[in-house]
Image (cartoon, rainbow, N blue to C red):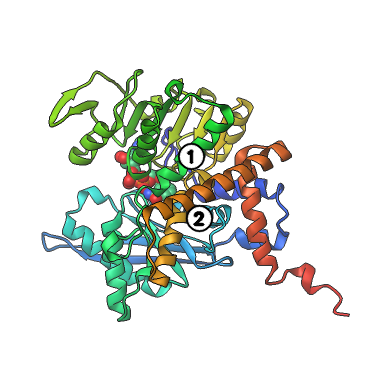
């Protein structure tokens, strides 16, 4: 992965640095921490795919099972040209922390394929997805490692993979993968869960700070699944979404955008245009074109990076003006930038809390698949709301108590919980105790 300055970042080395720093604020045993510095297993696969023109292309894919002490590994599958082993390991480590932050009985894992999915036809994408599942099938399973969608994968891709796995095992196994289409065993409320979880976190901040939403401006980097939903929920409450962007760049309008119209255009045409829809009539709206870098530096109240990692680095951290940064993407802030943001009084709600709504509802989906008892959408929303609010409040209190930043507090909560699980299997402290 490269950051905005174009420099390659070793994302996993950076993730380890942060882990070590945060561990000082946790009660985790050093032996348990040592276990968390190394993934349990890494699988690298070659996936031969027959292309539409008859040629063969071989893609490289990964699946990392980072830690499964608290439950089966859990984490998405990413399709992106910049996927690397380092990135997948870092994402898998963050999943381990994230499942602990929201207290669901999972460990952490992640997968990825080095591919530009936009360059493939739908049939090629289906063959690639089924081929990837064939290669990782012995490495995943409802009690072992449960994948889900991530960047440039969606419910249909999950459906293909579930189908392929079921064919291979000879039994219908919906709990092998989450984020599936509803008719194939997906959960109501999964599609918008990441954005909704981030929205519930922002509502907690709104309550603490007694905000009037109509006076709060928001910029969202990355207008995909997670970014669109959080923007839409905030818009419905009266927040002013003044800037959004995608991989091609961004648009800015101080008066704010009509988010449902923007979503309609983006999802129909893959373009970001400032358009209002009045019935079937579409009217272009004045907006300024900005770059992704400019978006990050806008003078707004809330900045939401919801695209890729390593967007805020030591180079641009001092220019971030938003007093609140909600990490909907995984790893959008490099560790070197943490201290600059903290010194500038910026509240950073870390990824392992802010975007944990997705994995929480994935857990609900897994439970529903295993029990055969399917929940209403209201039940999903209510339980998600309860978990996100409870964990936000717990982490906020810990941040104040330890006089630290919210990331360190969230890592502290996660490491305590994982540390307790590892300690329950025995550490040196236990084995050296006198038996008598
Ligand atoms: P997505 O594929 O639906 O959307 C990604 C968006 O980012 C697209 O609009 C794309 O155009 C844009 N983008 C790509 N490169 C960009 C760049 N350089 N600058 C600005 N925008 C760029 O993916 P998603 O599922 O919304 O995931 C986005 C982020 O949220 C990722 O970091 C992902 O790991 C994280 N996340 C997603 C989920 C989930 O359930 N979908 C859960 C937790 C975390």
Place of residue 347 in the rendered image (x, y in percent of width and height, measured from the top left) = 57, 32
Ligand 1 - quadrant of the structure image: top left
Q: Is residue 431 left or right of residue 151?
A: right
> Residue 110: in sight, yes or no?
no
Q: Is residue 389 above or below residue 174?
A: above
Place of residue 297 in the rendered image (x, y in percent of width and height, measured from the top left) = 45, 24
Q: Residue placed at 69% from the left, 69% from the top?
A: 424
Looking at the rendering, which quadrant does residue 228 occupy?
top left
Most extreme residue toward the left is 53
Which label was assigned to residue 247? none
Q: Residue placed at 65% from the left, 65% from the top?
A: 421
Q: Residue placed at 37% from the left, 39% from the top?
A: 227
Which label was assigned to residue 95? 2
Place of residue 247 in the rendered image (x, y in percent of width and height, measured from the top left) = 31, 37
Looking at the rendering, which quadrant does residue 235 occupy?
top left
Q: How many labels does the image show?
A: 2
Dot 2 falls on a residue whose secondary structure is helix
Dot 1 falls on a residue whose secondary structure is loop
Q: Are marks 1 and 2 in contact (CB under 8 Å)?
A: no
Place of residue 52 in the rendered image (x, y in percent of width and height, measured from the top left) = 12, 60
Which label was assigned to residue 327? 1
Q: Is residue 380 above or below residue 280?
A: below
Q: Residue placed at 58% from the left, 65% from the top?
A: 70
**Mark 1 closeness class: few <14, some 14–19, many ≥20 residues within 10 Å:** many
**Mark 2 closeness class: few <14, some 14–19, many ≥20 residues within 10 Å:** many
Q: In this view, does 12 lie to the left or right of 52?
A: right
């Amino acid at each position: 992965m490269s950051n905005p300055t174009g420099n390659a970042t070793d994302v996993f080395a950076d993730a380890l640095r942060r882990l070590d720093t945060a561990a000082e604020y946790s009660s985790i045993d050093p032996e348990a921490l040592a276990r968390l510095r190394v993934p349990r297993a890494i699988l690298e696969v070659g996936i031969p795919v027959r292309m539409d023109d008859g040629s063969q292309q071989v893609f490289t894919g990964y699946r990392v099972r980072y830690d499964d002490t608290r439950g089966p590994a859990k984490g998405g599958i990413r399709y992106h040209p910049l996927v690397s082993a380092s990135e997948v390991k870092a994402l898998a480590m963050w999943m381990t922390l994230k499942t602990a932050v929201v207290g669901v009985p999972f460990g952490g894992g992640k997968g990825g394929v080095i591919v530009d999915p936009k360059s493939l036809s739908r049939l090629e994408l289906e063959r690639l997805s089924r081929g990837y599942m064939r290669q990782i099938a012995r490495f995943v399973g409802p009690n072992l490692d449960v994948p889900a969608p991530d960047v440039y994968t969606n419910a249909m891709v999950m459906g293909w993979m579930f189908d392929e796995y079921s064919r291979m095992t000879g039994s219908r196994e919906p709990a092998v993968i989450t984020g599936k289409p509803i008719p194939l065993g997906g959960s109501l409320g999964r599609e918008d869960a990441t954005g909704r979880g981030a929205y519930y976190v922002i509502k907690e901040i709104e309550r603490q700070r007694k905000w009037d939403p109509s006076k709060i401006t928001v910029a969202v980097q990355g207008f995909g699944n997670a970014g669109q939903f959080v923007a839409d929920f905030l818009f419905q409450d009266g927040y002013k979404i003044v800037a959004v962007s995608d991989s091609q760049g961004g648009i800015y309008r101080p008066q704010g955008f009509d988010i449902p119209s923007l979503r309609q255009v983006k999802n129909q045409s893959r373009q970001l245009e400032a358009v209002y829809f009045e019935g079937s009539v579409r009217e272009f709206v004045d907006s300024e074109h900005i770059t992704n870098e400019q978006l990050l530096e806008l003078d707004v109240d809330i900045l939401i990076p919801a695209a890729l990692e390593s967007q805020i680095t030591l180079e641009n951290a001092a220019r971030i003006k938003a007093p609140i940064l909600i990490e909907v993407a995984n790893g959008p802030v490099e560790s070197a930038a943490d201290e600059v943001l903290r010194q500038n009084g910026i509240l950073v709600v870390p990824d392992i809390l802010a975007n944990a709504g997705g994995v929480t509802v994935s857990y609900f989906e897994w439970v529903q698949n295993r029990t055969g008892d399917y929940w209403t959408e209201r039940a999903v929303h209510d339980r998600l709301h309860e978990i996100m609010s409870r964990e936000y409040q717990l982490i906020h209190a810990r941040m104040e108590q330890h006089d630290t930043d919210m990331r360190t507090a969230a890592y502290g909560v996660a490491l305590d919980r994982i540390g307790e699980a590892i300690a329950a299997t025995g550490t040196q402290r236990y084995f050296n105790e006198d038996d008598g």
